[in-house]
Image (tube, coloured by chain):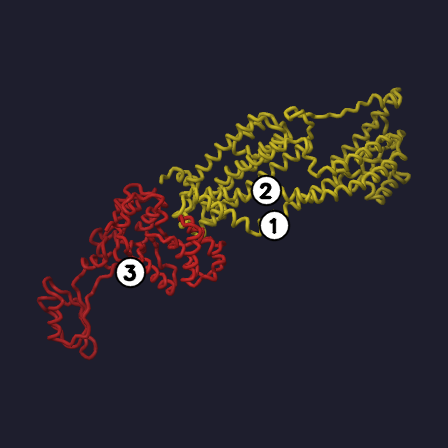
Amino acid sequence: MDKIWLIIQREYLTRVRKKSFLIMSLLAPLLLAGSLVGIAKFSGSSETQVVAVRDDSAQRMLQHLTATEEVRFVPASGTTLAGATEAFKKARPKQDALLYFPPSFTLDNSTGIQLLANGNVSLNRQSKIRKAVEKAVGELKLSRSGLTQTTIDNLKAKVELDAVDLTQQGGRKNNVGTTTAAAYFLSILVYMFIFIYGVQVMRGVGEEKSSRIMEVMISSVKPFQLMMGKILGIAAVVLTQFALWMVLSWGLTTLAAPLLMKSDVKSPPAAAVAGMQQATTYDKAPAATATASDDAAVAPTAATTSPWSFLSGLPVGTIIGGFLFFFLGGYLLYSALFASIGAAVDDQTDSQQFMFPITIPLILSYVVSINVIINGDPNGPLAFWLSMIPFTSPIAMVMRLPFGVPMWQLLLSGTLLVAGFVLTTWVAARIYRVGILMYGKKVTYAELSKWMFYKG
Amino acid sequence: MQPILQALNVRKAYAQHVALDGVSLDIPERSIFGLLGPNGAGKTSLIRIITQITAADEGEIRFRGERLKPAHIAEIGYLPEERGLYKKMKVGEQLLYLARLRGMSRADATERIKAWLTRFDIKPWAEKNVEDLSKGMQQKVQFIATVLHEPSLIILDEPFSGFDPINANLIKDEILDLRDRGATIIFSTHRMESVEEMCDSIALINRSRKVLDGPVSAIKDQFKTQTYEVEGKGRLMVMHPDFEVLEHKERENGHFYDRIRLHAGTTPNDLLRYLISNVEVHAFRELIPSINDIFIRRVRETMPESLVEPVSA
C-alpha cells in the first residue's frame, strides 16, 4: 500500500508541475467565464430580423402582420416589385428579407407569396415569418366572418406552461433550457475527461515501456500496484484540475458580474425605444412594448443575484455528487483498459487498432444518449438501460442527472459501475502484467486473450 | 556457510519453449558469482524469478534459507540488461523515488544519494532531468539506483554492455568494493571473458539447463589439460616418453615456441628440468583454459555436436 501511495504521488506531482497543466487550469475557466459573460450579454437581445413587405394584393397585409421579438415588418419602398427589390438591396443589411404578396393573393388563395433575400434564409427564420403571415391571414378570416377585433382578442387563449418537477422538494419549478444545457455540459465533460486522461494513462504506460524502466520498476513493485498507482495518480490530477476550474470559474464570474449588470442596465431604454417605434407604426404594438419592458425589468435582478443563478431549480447536490462518482467510476473503468493497451503494444502507433473497441462504446454512449435522453425521454426504458450498463452509464447517467433520477436507479447503476471497473481492472491487470515485459512482438487479440490466462 | 541464494530444481516454461529446466544453484555469500551462458540460455528467466518479476513453475528459490517472499525485494538490487530511467524526471528525485519503492526512508535515501552522487562526480547534475545527461552519466545514475538501498544481493545483467571503458572500470572497482563490504554480486552475461577474472564462482547455463557450476579455481583445475607454453633458444627433442609436443614453431636465430602436454605422472618440474638441461629457457607458462573454452568443451561432452550453440565472444 505504501508503494502505491508513492507511485500515486509521483504520477500526480510530475503532471501537476507541468506547464501544460497550469495553462489548461487557467485557460479553461477564462474561456468558461468568457462564454458565460457572452451568453448573458447576447441571450437577452437575440437579433430581431427586419422584413420589408411589398404588397400588390388588396389585403393590406402589412397592417395585419404582428411584430414579435424575432420579426419586425416594415413597408418596402419603390412602386414596383423590381423597385422594391432594388430598394431592399440598398437597405441591406438593415433589412434581412423582402416579403412579397402577389396581386393574385387573397385570403382564400394564399399561394404565390415570396420571400426574397440574399442567400438562404434559415429554416428557423422562415418558419417565424410564415407563422406571422399565417396568424395575420387567420385573424383576417375571423374578422371577415363577422367577429369584431375585441372578440378575436378575447378568443385568444394565452397559456403558459409551468412544468413542476414533483421529485424535487416542494415541487420546484424546472427549467428545460437549463436542465438540457447542464445535461449536455456535464456529459461532454465526462466524455472528454475520460478520453483525455484515459489516453494519458495509456501514454504513461507506453513511456515506461519504451524507456525500459519497466523492469526496474517491476522488480520493486507488483505490476498491479504500478498500474493502479498510475491510474489513481492521474485521477487525482483530474480532480485537482476540476476543482481549480470550479474555483477559478466561480471567482472570475463573480468578478465579471458587475460588468454584466452594467450592460443590462443599458438595455431597458433601448428596448423602450424599439417599442415606441413599433407603437407608432402598428396598432398591436402596445403589447410588444409591455413585454419588452417586462423583460428589461427582470434581467438586471437576475444578474445582480449571481451569474450562477441559472442553476437554481436543479438538484445541484445530487448532480455534483453523481457527476463525481460516475466520472470517477467511468474513468477507472476505461483507464484500466487504456493502461492495458499501453502495456500490450510497443509503439504508440500500434495502439490505434486496440483503441478502437474502447472508444466505440464511449462515443456511442455519448451520441446515443443525446438522442435518447435529451431529445427523447430522460426516464424511458432505453435511457434506463443506457444508464445501467457500466460502459455507457458514466455518460448516460450524468446526462440524466439534471432531469432527476430515482435514488434506487442511482444506487443500482453505481453498484454496477463499481462491479464493472473491478472486472475491467482485473482483465487489464492480467494483460498489463504480461505486456509490460513483452518487446518486439506484434500483438493480436488472440494473443491478448491468451495473456489473460497466463499464470504467475 | 549458508549460501545467500539457493535455486532448487527450478523450472519455467513459456507457451512455446522451456526457459529453465531443473536448474539448481548455490550462490555463496560475499562472493561474485557469474551466471554464464549464450543468449537465450535462460539466464534472464532465472534472474526474473529471483527478482520476483515472474514465478517459477516448479522448484523454489531460497534467500538465506527462506522461501523467496516480497519482503526480500528490499535486499536485492537489480540492474536489468535493458537500462531505463524516467527521462523527464530529475536525477535526485528519481533516485529518491526508486530507493523509497525499495523500502528506504526519505531521510536515509537523501543522505546516501548525496554520498553516491559526490562519489561519482555527478552531484551538480542532481537537479537536471535524466534526458539532459550524457549516456555515461545516465549509466552511473542507473548503477546508483541499483545499489542505493545497500542490497545484500546485487544482480547485474550484462553489467558492462553499454558502459564505456572508463565507466566500466569505475563500476568494476565499485563492485569489488561492494563485495568487500559484504554484498554478494551476481553477474549474468554471455560475454564470459568480460567477467572471468572477477568471478569467485560461476554457473554455466546452456539451453535452459545448468551444465557446470562451482568455484572458478576448482573448475579450472578440473579442466586443466597439463599443457605448457615454452619459449627458448636451442634444439628441443620432439619425441619424448614423458611428454608430447603439440605445436612447434621455429623462429629466427634458433628461437622456438612450443606447446607441450605432459603425460600422466609427469610434473611440470620434470619438464622444466629436462628443458633446462637441453635448451635456454626464456618463458615457461601453464596454459589455463578460459571459461569460454571450458564451456565449449563441456557442452560438447554433454550434448551431441549439432546442439552446441556458437558462443559469441
Three-letter residue code for mark 2: Phe
- Distance Cα–Cα, label 1 vs label 3: 54 Å
Q: How many marks?
A: 3
Residue sitting at the far front:
B107
Which residue is more in the foreground, B32 or B37? B32
Which residue position is annotated with label 1?
A23
Q: Quadrant of residue A379?
A: top right
Relative vertical location of residue A129 with respect to residue A153 in this rendering, above or below: below
Tell me the chain of label 2: A
Residue sitting at the far left:
B241
Residue B83's tag is none
Which residue position is annotated with label 2?
A242
- Distance Cα–Cα, label 2 vs label 3: 57 Å
Tell me the chain of label 3: B
Q: Are marks 2 and 3 on the same chain?
A: no
- Is A424 displayed left or right of A363 in the figure? left
- Is A163 displayed left or right of A446 in the figure? right
Say which colour chain A has. Answer: yellow
Residue at 75% across / 42% down in the picture? A260
The local secondary structure at tag 1 comes to helix
Tell me the chain of label 1: A
**Which chain identifier belongs to the red chain?**
B
Q: Position of residue A199 (x, y in %)?
A: 52, 44
